[in-house]
Amino acid sequence: MPRALVDNALVGGTWRRNVGLEWDDSGRILSIAPDSAPAQGVERIAGAAVPGLANLHSHTFQRAIAGVSESLGTGGDTFWTWRQAMYRAVERLTPENLRAVAALAFAEMLEGGFTAVAEFHYIHNGADGKPFADRAAMAAAVIEAAKETGIGLTLLPVFYAHGGFGGKPLETAQRRFTSDLNGFAKLVEASAAALKALPGAAWGVAPHSLRAVAPDELKAVARDFAGKPIHIHAAEQVREVEECVAALGRRPVEWLLDELPVGRGWCLVHATHLTDPEVKRLAGSGAAAGLCPVTEANLGDGIFPAASYLGVGGRLGVGTDSNIRIDAAEELRQLEYSQRLGARARNVLAAPGRSTGRVLFDAALAASADALARPVGALAPGKRADFAVLDLGHVSMQDRAGDTWLDSWIFAAGKQAVREVWVGGRRVVAQGRHVAADRIRSAYVRALPQLIG
């Protein structure tokens, strides 16, 4: 017998009515039955259910500084000056206040339509730069936040060894990120052990970037953790690209594709500044481009060449990165709008006659299972029972149907149209609010003065 009957659901690429969903106690879908009849004891869910989106890139702790770096200094403002403001918050992080901030960010992700997250976690050490007695103390705080909120977690411990290309010394705040290869192996082992407390969680690794990891170190990480998701920042900033060429003789994405087995399970985060040959090679590799359009706009990174990349079969997903705003629809909308601004045209990423919202949504789903090592990305047997339910009674969703629901969600209603969210067959958002929203927000408010006071 189905556990739930949904009025409308996107199943196998088609909108179906009266969809019965059955899942097991672990949260995996056992069966899907469109055109089911109501039955006693089966919960009826009004609205339109869509597979939950995966957040491919997040630094949850940065939620604490959202909105506090929006004034112009005397020397101008760039990604690099913003980074100094972020580092000031890093110095004050403890496992306790990190858990509070991460829980808020995760709850807001769920409220915004994300059901799983790849957490690019790089705060490992104490304020003095020394590892905690428990190397996974900070990771455990993130894990506890995921457990409290119910979000699907893929934890990506970050390897960070240097302050810039050529083995540049670390800045003071960066001491909290750093380890050598031996220490990183111990960190990953401790983090994987801590994850056992969270059923269904997954893990991978994240060599931070070519500026923070030397080529020989990066090759060692790729070798030692082959088969696991590997995420890395690449080509986010023009200055980064220029410094990489000066240090390594090649552009960041070019170097990665030349020197490493980049393919499915890899996620190149941002990849903003690509040449035409890099676009084709990255698309052909099977790796995902992890785009964070809201953060990239906030930091002035640039515009990813999404139209040409998708045009040659590239795979991509979206993430919330700095968590300046947390809303799945807003990330997809900003992705399309950035293309419109660059091309001075409309509906740039849609094929003729196709819904732009549907194209964006499908593209964001396609790479999620590989990038997160989780059975997500569709409503289908064997996948997780992770889905968001759109409120068809919302004023911006009235008199719509099918793919126009996606258009109206992404381009008009935003997260206000997300009425319910289910993860692993458990409802974690009801009436647009996380089921533990009051407790989570109260804990965040108590922790915030420790970080920005």
Image: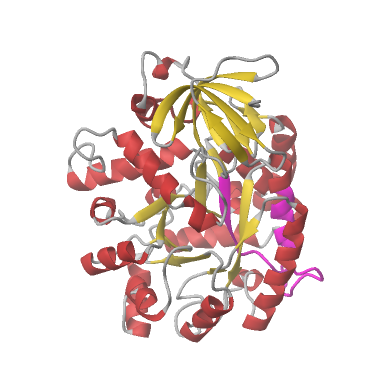
Task: Decide: is 123 above or below 21.
Answer: below
Residue 298 visible in the shown view: no
93 vs 340, nearest the viewer: 340
Image check: 185 left or right of 242? right
x 68%, y 41%: residue? 150
Q: Is residue 21 rendered magenta in the image?
A: no
Q: Which residues are magenta?
A: 116-145
Q: Residue at x 74, y 68 (%)?
A: 190
Can residue 139 be found in the magenta stretch?
yes
Given residues 139 and 116, the one toward you in this image is: 116
- Say whether residue 356 is left or right of residue 3: left
Residue 404 x, y percent position in the rendering: 34, 25
Res 159 seen here: yes
Front-most of 397 and 302?
A: 397
Q: Residue 25: x, y in percent?
A: 72, 39
Determine which quarter of the picture holds residue 107: top right
Q: Residue at x 64, y 15 (%)?
A: 39
Query: Where residue 185 sits: x, y (%)?
Result: 67, 77
From this view, report whether residue 46 is shown above or below residue 93.
above
Q: Position of residue 37 (x, y in %)?
A: 56, 15
What colour-coding does the image apply? secondary structure
